[in-house]
Amino acid sequence: MTDLRSYFSQLEPSLIEWLTDLVNFDSPSGNKAALDALARKLAGHFERCGATLRWVPNSDTGDHLLVRFEGDASKAPVLILGHLDTVWEIGEAERRPARLEDGKLFGPGAFDMRGGLTLMMGAASYVSSHPGQLQRPVTLLLSSDEEVGSHTSRSLIEAEGRRHGLVLVLEPCLPGGALKTARKGVGTVMITARGVASHAGVDYARGVSAIREMAHQIGRIYQMNDPDKGTTLNVGVIRGGTRSNVVAERAEMEVDFRVWTAEEGQRIERELRELTPTVEGTTLEVTGGLNRPPLERSPATIKLFQRAKSLAAEIGLELQEGSTGGGSDGCFTAALGIPTLDGLGPDGAGPHALHEHVLVESLAPRAALLTQLILNLDAG
């Protein structure tokens, strides 16, 4: 595989062109027409590279796309995860089209995760132009709703994960190129308080304020934070009441929580569901829970990373590892016990921000790394 680095160095102009094209193509979560159009666009490239396609219809967001490259069925297949959706609405690419400046390619979705999609296109091109080097089946799973919780794609991701020996996730890397061998699990709960409405001037004593009850619960929730365990809870949205002269009959809040272990996630879920009213005459309802399990830094994950690090060294790349508080679709496969490596996308910064960008110099090396792992990494 000594030609990998040189191949992708020569392919760099195409990688830049592909990334620019993807950045200039809006596909926000929930916009089915835009997501399906992007899927078809990518499907054409993969089909030209010799892959077979399977479309998974989805009426809620865009269709999900499975791209399969054939290989020796006796060898453990590899699943590669990516997503088509971004957090940017239609028109954002027109307002901020891709631009190359000081070795950085800026634009909406560039880092999360147009860069990862670009690397997939590069790896497919290598496989197509080097027949016989791919010895085992490889599947690319492109989902359409990762940015909004993967509610329609989770079952597909888990089903495909069980069919494969290991999983590679093309989410952005950590600064400097480190892979993500641990991710926090992510949960969301909705807490609703109900009281009794009344006129704030005429019948104040008859009212029971749901907002007052919610104020007590907010304090309780922040007391659940445990910095030593890395457990965080955040009240991100509060809604309640109708007018200032009406005692609020209803109030609700959305709570985000993050945990490093499944056990801690269960504890937080239990404590949230055990919250009880403090204001007489109010009731509480708690819905939701952990929607992405943590990607725990297990012995299997460590062994997989060490093998990846050795393979990276063979093509002159030094790999590091790290952790992040954000979740990804790799959390689902890791929770099933399937060896999963995350953060294989290109280097850059600013996901979901106006300064979002990819470091152009990282495109060719990261495409070479992805291809090296596809060809040679095994779950052991």
Image: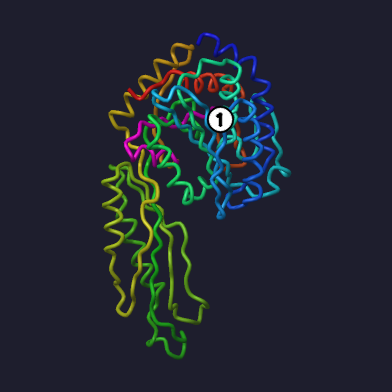
Q: Is residue 147 left or right of residue 338?
A: right
Q: Quadrant of residue 235?
A: bottom left
| Residue 296 place in picture, x, y as percent | 32, 36
Q: Is residue 69 left or right of residue 259?
A: right
Q: Is residue 229 above or below residue 371?
A: below
Q: Residue at x 45, y 16 (%)?
A: 312
Name the quadrant of the C terminus.
Answer: top left
Q: Is residue 248 left or right of residue 127?
A: left
| Residue 95 place in picture, x, y as percent | 72, 44
Residue 346: in magenta span? yes
Instruction: Pick whichever, 179 or 149, lies toward us.
Output: 149
Label 1: which secondary element:
strand
Question: What is the residue that sits farthest to the front in this orientation?
Answer: 73
| Residue identifier under label 1 | 348
| Residue 207 place in picture, x, y as percent | 39, 84
Instruction: Pick whichever, 76 or 328, lies toward us.
Output: 76
| Residue 194 place in picture, x, y as percent | 39, 75
Q: Residue at x 35, y 34 (%)?
A: 338
Q: Is residue 340 above or below residue 65?
A: above
Name the residue type under label 1.
Answer: Gly
Q: Residue at x 37, y 87 (%)?
A: 205
Q: Is residue 321 above or below residue 212?
A: above
Q: How is the image coloured?
A: rainbow
Q: Residues within 10 Å of mark 1 (few under 14, many from 20)?
A: many
Question: What is the residue that sits farthest to the bottom in this orientation?
Answer: 202
Q: Quadrant of residue 325?
A: top left
Magenta residues, start to end: 329-347
